[in-house]
Image (cartoon, helix red, strand yellow):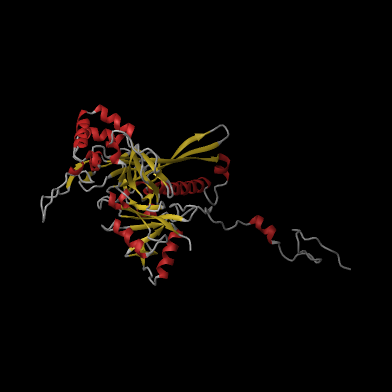
Amino acid sequence: MTTSVESPSGGEGATEQGRLSLDTAAARNLASTTKTPPQMQGISSRWLLKVLPWVHVSGGTFRVNRRLTHTLGDGRVEFVSTGTEVRVIPLELGELPLLRGYSDEPVLAALAARCEQRDFGPGETLVEAGRPADRVVLIAHGKLQRLGRGKYDEEASLGVLADGDFAGAEELAAAEPGEWDFSLRTLTSGTALTLTREAFDEVRDASASLREHLEAARATPPGARTAEGEAAVALASGHVGEPALPGTFVDYELAPREYELSVAQTVLRVHSRVADLYNEPMNQVEEQLRLTVEALRERQEHELVNNREFGLLHNADLRQRIRTRTGPPTPDDLDELLATVWKEPSVVLAHPKAIAAIGRECTRRGVYPQSIDLEGHSVPAWRGVPILPCDKIPVSSTGATSVLAMRTGESDRGVVGLHQTGIPDEYRPGLSVRFMGIDERAVISYLVSAYYSAAVLVPDALGILEDVEIGH
């Protein structure tokens, strides 16, 4: 007769004869497991933080002194930008036919200060035919189409306006505002500045020199000026007269750009019981701090790309922004992008999906980008310039993104990162962990702070390929 013996450890699988060895479930109670440190899916390669040379900013502010360069007499208006803010150079208003030859800089500065910025997307109508022409439109960036009525009353294209062009300037000279005889419809996204007739009249009424200039301009016979506002050259035959040569005016910026260090902060809280009792085999505070620092570094890279004050996407010069020819990033587009930073380009940054699209377009043409070794990693390259992934570059809902090319380094007049080292309670360069105390609930608090920014030393150090389609 056999008797059933219950397994001392219980559990499924016990036989009628009883277990011959200790069950694994029970054995685990007396053994320590092999563990990994806490894992975090949000950690990326953060190539931007690796490739940027970091400059120590001792006073918390970094000033970039530049020469203000603009060309007079080329018929195009030039602008300067600070982050997302775009301003017209006052002397460049002299490119408008009405103000050609007028050089009273304080008055031109007053007119420039009254220009209002308007950011637009594709498909918008900035001015409409038949409406009062009560403003001048200065195009800082983007493309707009002039639309009017054709011979058979159909809508006809009258041409395209782009960076530096303007419309409506002649209406400011009229005694009474007229009407737009064409519409302006945007073809791409961009930025325009508008100067209303009301704002123009305010400056005119306050300036005797501007009133005299306008009276002289209105008194000029119609045939004595060209469409561009220049004095007409009487021609009989052959070459008569001497055309005016474009002049260049170079000056220092009176108000150079200053970058203040930005900050990303959080308060890390750990209960003292956890810190006291559960520190083997891994230090709980150190692991909590390690993951917090990783999250701060991810936010830091995101801000360096997307921040509207100092982020790279918003601080590229308007003339350094180009668009793809057909949508997807072709080899031709990459060549154009490198041409914007042709003085020793250092790196190209793109979203991983954009890099995949680049590979598809190259394969379609039978072109295979080479790979180069960068810090022990094999990365794709174009013309010897590494193409590095950066998932912080946004992708729109329509599948459009941007690709950045840059020259890095302070000595090469490139893009640099800014931080301050030697700060109190420094844990990493530019990052501090400060003990805040223990509250009445026995919770230990640490203030974790990261200080950073980025600066583009000269405009041609950063170029952006916009409206890159990543779809198949």
Q: Is residue 429 visible?
A: no
The number of numbered badges drawn on the structure is 0
Image quarter in which the N terminus is found: bottom right
| Along the line of sight, the residue nearer the viewer: 458 or 361 | 361
Residue lying at 26% horizontally and 30% vertically, measured from the top left: 204
Q: Is residue 11 above or below residue 310?
A: below
| Along the line of sight, the residue nearer the viewer: 156 or 4 | 156
- Location of residue 261 in the rendering, given as x and y in whole percent from the top left corner: 36, 40
Residue lying at 51% horizontally and 45% vertically, measured from the top left: 285
Q: Residue placed farthest to the right in the image?
A: 1
- Location of residue 2 in the rendering, given as x and y in whole percent from the top left corner: 86, 67
Residue lying at 34% horizontally and 46% vertically, measured from the top left: 315
- Location of residue 295 in the rendering, given as x and y in whole percent from the top left corner: 47, 48
From the viewer's perspective, is 324 left or right of 243? right
- Location of residue 236 in the rendering, given as x and y in whole percent from the top left corner: 11, 52
Q: Is residue 345 above or below residue 435?
A: below
Question: Within the image, what quadrant is residue 65 found in?
Answer: top left
